[in-house]
Image: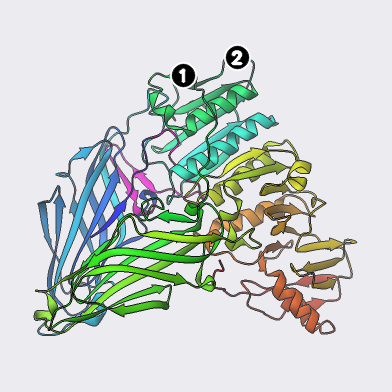
Amino acid sequence: MRVIRCIPPLALILVALSPAVAHADRSADSITVSADTLGFGDHIGFRGHDDTVTLTLPVPAGLTPRALDATVQPPGDLARGRIDVLSDGVVQQRIPLDADAVAAPLTIPLDLVPVRDGAATVTLHTALYPIGETCPADWTGRALALLDPRIRYDGTPRDPATVGEFLPPILERIELYLPEQPTAAESAAAASLTTAIGSRYSGREPEFVVLPAPPAATDDAGAFTRRIVIHQNDATAQARVLPAQTTPTLELTGSAAGLADQVRGLRSDLSVLAVQETATLGGTAVVPQLATTDLAFDELGIGAPSATAVGVATVEFGVDQSRIGRRVHDLRLELSGVYTPTTSVRTGIVTVSVGDRVVDSWPADDTGRIDRTVSVPDALLSRVTPVTVSLQTSGGTTQCGLEQPVTIRFDGTSRVITAPAGAGVDFAALPHSLLPDVQVATATASLADTARAVGILADLQALSGAPLIPEWVSVDAAVTGDKPAIIVSPDTVPTGLNLPLTLTGGRALTVTDDTGRTGTVTFPSDVRFASLQVLEDSGRTVLVASATTPAAELDRTLSWLRAEPGRWATLTGDVVFTAPGQEPMVLTAATTATAADTASDDLGIVGRMLTIGGVLAAAGLLVGGIVAFACRGHRSPRP
């Protein structure tokens, strides 16, 4: 049985960040929310002839789950089938499937599912029967799918009356309001709230925006939008739910130290005790969990994964380096669990794969026990390393094995053993090489620069299962510091760092890899560009967002990264380069510098130096002073 949990801990800050996308359709008494917003993706897949998926759905106050609407895609060679809807182990509904439909609308009623503590848990069980005596092999993968699932709620969301209940379990948009020239304390509060929000809503991607204060009290920004106003003053520090606001709004006020106290309180479970519309929060700073070399599945959020199926039972899980708390290598899995034992007429094999590569296998036996250490090659490690463990059996079955399903289950005490890998030098090492404490600096004290820094933090936090703990500092402190850092400088390139891509004299672009090899492109006239660059500096990772051109190019680069879901997650290389009038490009300094070193007299190097995802492509040089780079491709993520 697979479990999909879609409701976060019941604390105040409960949301991740993402591009602006409207997910909820709201009418007078019905609200529809996409599965993406709830955190379980754009489809629900079922394997084999018999499979079970459990969904835990958030239920905001004032709403009742009514139905799950989707497009059902049954497998080929289906004679008949059904979906059972269960709650607390009791079948509430039984829905027959149309065997002839390629894709048909399907509604699964949820009105009989009880709501407890702001959540409704429903189990969907599929039973599929093939035509005649055929046993379709492809059913062991994804046999049936519910495409574009949406949850329909009845009722009207209830506005929060206290600080502790300010944010609902479903959240599509957060608006942070700051002055046009925010103080360092106000910017720090916005940054800290951003990562706290992202870590509490890991796996979801609502929109996050920074706007100038004050918000318009009568604007209705949607059922699942919340506003937070941050204002430094000399008054008593407090968090207050503002009255008479069409969109629920929380105001944080106080001195620099007072604002920091309120944010620390909101990051912690202390916020649930704020049961009035106004409260002053205090306490010690959040202590980040230290990374360790030995962690149990339970500690990494993997839990005790299990699967039951016919012929092949497959368990899938990911080892998230951000949950470990740093970049790692020498990863070993100490697997402990059980499976359906073999018999004299049924044999089997257990296979462990990472991505598409098998890293270990062994014959199943009659003990049914798993006690195995599996090593994962460093080349296969990624931000979240995908692991698949399959039990495949053969022999001694009838009716396509429907009478003899097999099970594989792991203990939550199974362990992940790692060694620290040091600082990361590319985008694939983010955000885990920045954890937990990261310095954040902007070139100016403007709202725009704060918004850029907050946006980058939001994007990185959305990739992490553990919270980034930002410290707002000056650019000089971030350049010379000993902690990981994020620097935003949209009008100038910060000095004092050995950036992979530099501009000399306004006309020479130089790419330098971490061994010191260089490649240079010289232009007949000045060139301007914006970039995001990752580098290693004195054993720490630094991310620099800068430009030699007006800030609009840097903003266009950041918008490009957010425009396509998953683009940040699949980003590799160490430079994102954007020239005016050109699409952003992804460079790998080691690749471009090596190419330049071996073909320095060849004009084709202009194309080879600017790579997207490591795929080399030709480009042209126009003597009139315009250089156009156009190359596309994809690379596999690196650890």
Model colouring = rainbow
Q: Nearer the viewer, residue 173 or 314?
A: 314
Q: What secondary structure do most residues of the magenta stretch adopt?
A: loop
CA separation in Å, label 2 and label 1:
13 Å
Is the residue marked by circle 2 packed among few (<14), some (14-19), or many (20+) residues within 10 Å? Answer: few
Q: Which residues are magenta?
A: 11-36
Is 32 within the magenta?
Answer: yes
Residue at 90%, 61% in the rendered image? 505
User: Does label 2 or label 1 sit earlier along the sequence?
Assistant: 2
Q: From where the camera sits, is residue 312 visible?
A: yes
**Image quadrant in which the C terminus is located:** bottom right
Residue at 17%, 77% in the rendered image? 342
Q: Position of residue 7 (x, y in %)?
A: 34, 44
**Image quadrant in which the N terminus is located:** bottom left
Q: Position of residue 246 (x, y in %)?
A: 43, 27
Residue at 41%, 65% in the rendered image? 333
Please indicate whether residue 515 sits to the left or right of residue 356 in the image. Answer: right
The answer to which image quadrant residue 189 occupies is top right
- Against 281, residue 527 (above or below) is below
Q: Secondary structure at mark 2?
A: loop
Farthest residue, direction top: 235
Q: Position of residue 275 (x, y in %)?
A: 37, 21
Q: Position of residue 3 (x, y in %)?
A: 28, 55
- Against 165, residue 484 (above or below) is below
Is the residue marked by circle 1 packed among few (<14), some (14-19), or many (20+) residues within 10 Å? Answer: many
Mark 2–mark 1 CB contact (< 8 Å): no
Numbered badge on residue 279: 1
Numbered badge on residue 206: none
Give the residue number, with chain letter if any, for mark 2.
235
Residue at 77%, 46% in the rendered image? 480
